[in-house]
Image (cartoon, rainbow, N blue to C red):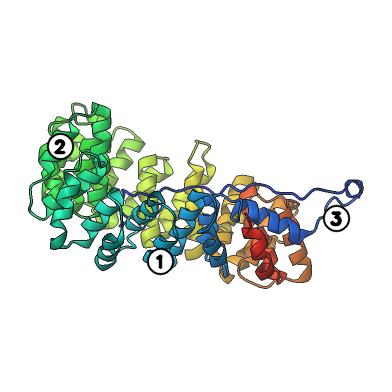
Amino acid sequence: MPRRLSFSSSCLLVASSALIPFPAAAVAQTDPYGKVDAVDASVSVLRRSVGGAGVPANVSELANLNLPGFSSILQAGVTNPNAAMRVRASIDLAESGEPIPLLLSRLDSDDERGALIVAAFSKRLIDPPMAGTIADDLDTDDVALAILLAVADRSEDAARLSELAGDSEAAWLTRGIAATTLEQRGTPALESWFDAVAELAPAMQDLTVFELLATIDRLDFDIAIGRMAGLIGDRPFNDALRAALVESLLDTSPKSGLVAWNSMVDDCPEDGMITPIGMLLVSAGQPAPADKKNRFPSDDRLSEAITELIFTPPSQRGQAAIPAVRLGHRPTMIWAMGEAKANGDLPLLEAIFDTASTSRRPGVSDFAIRAAEVLGTTSPSALGRRLVDQEDRAIIEFVFRGLIAAGTPEAAAEATPYLEASARTTRSLALLAVARSGDLDTDQIRLLGRAAAGGGGLPPDLRPLAAWLFLESRGELKNSIPRITEN
C-alpha cells in the first residue's frame, strides 16, 4: 500500500507558449502557419518549457514519460542557472538510476544538496550503505544530515546524533530527527526535544511535531512513534496531530494503534462527526472492530456507503469503495486512487474516472486525469469505449491524456480512429497518442509540427510533448538539444 505521508507533491504540467515572430508579409497569407518553421517553433516551445528557460514541474512531467533522449535535457538541467531547475533535474536523474553521490557533487550549495537528499529519501532511493557514505562526506548540519544518519543506522554515529539533537542553532526538525533516531536505538532524547520545542507558539509547535512525525513514519520508527504518543499529551478527538499519530501507530504498531483509535471513537461526542476517524483505519489498511459499527451513521446513502467501506475487511475494500466513490466522497477517492493504482483494480479505476470526469467541483478533475493515466496503461480499451459518441470535450481530453501517457501500441490503436475526427483538437490529441508509440507518415509529421507550434488546438501543457515527438520524427532532435538547453 502506498505510504500516505510524503515530502513530494504532485504538480500539473504548465508550459509557456512560445511562438516565433511572424514577418509582416507572412501575416497576410491565407495559411497563417505557412511561414512558420515548425522545427524552430518546437525548439522554442521546448526551451521555454523544459530547457534553458524552463520550469521544474514541466521537466518532471516529461521525465515521467521516459522519452528516449530526454536524459540529455536532465543532464543539462543540473547546470541550469535556476537552482530549482538544477534540483529538479537531479531528482529525476536519481529516479532514473544516476548515482546520487555523483549528482550531489554537481550541485552548488548545501541547500540544493539537502533538497536532493530529502527528495531521494522520500522516494526511498537511499539505502543504509549509501546514506553512510554520503553522511561521511557531507559538510552540513541541516535536516539532510539528520536523515542520512537515521537511514544509515550505524552505532558509531551516536555522538554525531547527540550533537545534532542538542545543537540550539540547528533547525527544530533536524534536532527532532536526531532525537527520535537516538530514541529508536534505546537512548532517551525525545523528551528533551519536546521540552525545548515547547517554547514555540502552539501553532508552530504543532506544525513542527507534525513534520517530525511524518519523517519518522517514513523511517518506520515504531519505538519513537510510541514514545511520541506519550509525550504529545491529551488532544481533542478531532485534532489533526492526534489523527496523524493514530494513523502512524496503526501503520507501525497495529495493536497500540487500535487502542489509540478506540480512544478517539470514545472521545467523539456525536456520531455525525465520527466518519473521519473511521477512515483512518481504511488509510492504514487495518480492520475495524465490529463492536464499534453502531457508532457510525447510515441514515443516508453516503453515510451508509462510507460505513460499509470502513467495516469491510481490508482485502475487499477496493470493491466496497465504489459506492462512496460514485457519490463523490473526496477522502474515499483519495484512498481509492492509491489502492486502484497499486492493485490495477479496473472497476475501481473506472468508477473514479466516471465520477471525476463528470464532476464540476474544483480539483476533482485531477482524479480523472490520474485514473485515465493508469487505465491507459492497464486497460486502454476501457478508455477507448468512452470515446464512442462522446461529445463532452472535457471527457474526450481526459481519455486522450490517458492514452498519450501510456505510449503503447494498444493505446495508439484506441486513438487511431479519431485521426480524422471533425474537431481539430480531437484530431491533434489522437495524433499525439499515435505519435507516442509508432511511426508517422509525412503528412502526420507535418501536422504534429503544426500542433507543437500552436496550430492544432492542443492544450498548452501538451505542446512540449508534441514538439519533442515532432523533432524526433524529423530526425532533428539530436541537433536541437543544444538550442533547447541554452540559457
The residue that mark 1 highlights is 102
The CA span between labels 2 and 3 is 68 Å
Mark sitting earlier along the chain (1/2): 1
Mark 1 or mark 3, whichever is nearer to me? 1
* Count of marks overlaid on the render: 3
Q: Is residue 158 visible?
A: yes
| Disc number for residue 194 | 2
The residue that mark 3 highlights is 35
CB within 8 Å, label 2 to label 3:
no
Mark 1 secondary-structure assignment: helix
> In the image, residue 337 lies at what x, y percent?
40, 51
The residue nearer to you, when weighing 272 against 224, is 224
Amino acid at the residue labelled 1:
Leu
Residue drawn at x 50%, y 56% is 60
The residue nearer to you, when weighing 335 against 62, is 62
Mark 3 secondary-structure assignment: loop
Mark sitting earlier along the chain (1/3): 3
Badge 3: how crowded within 10 Å, few (<14), some, or many (20+)?
A: few
The quarter of the displayed image where residue 117 is located: bottom left
Q: Is residue 254 visible?
A: no
CB within 8 Å, label 1 to label 3:
no
Amino acid at the residue labelled 2:
Phe
The residue nearer to you, when weighing 456 against 163, is 163
| Left or right of 391 in this view: 226 | left
The residue nearer to you, when weighing 272 against 286, is 286
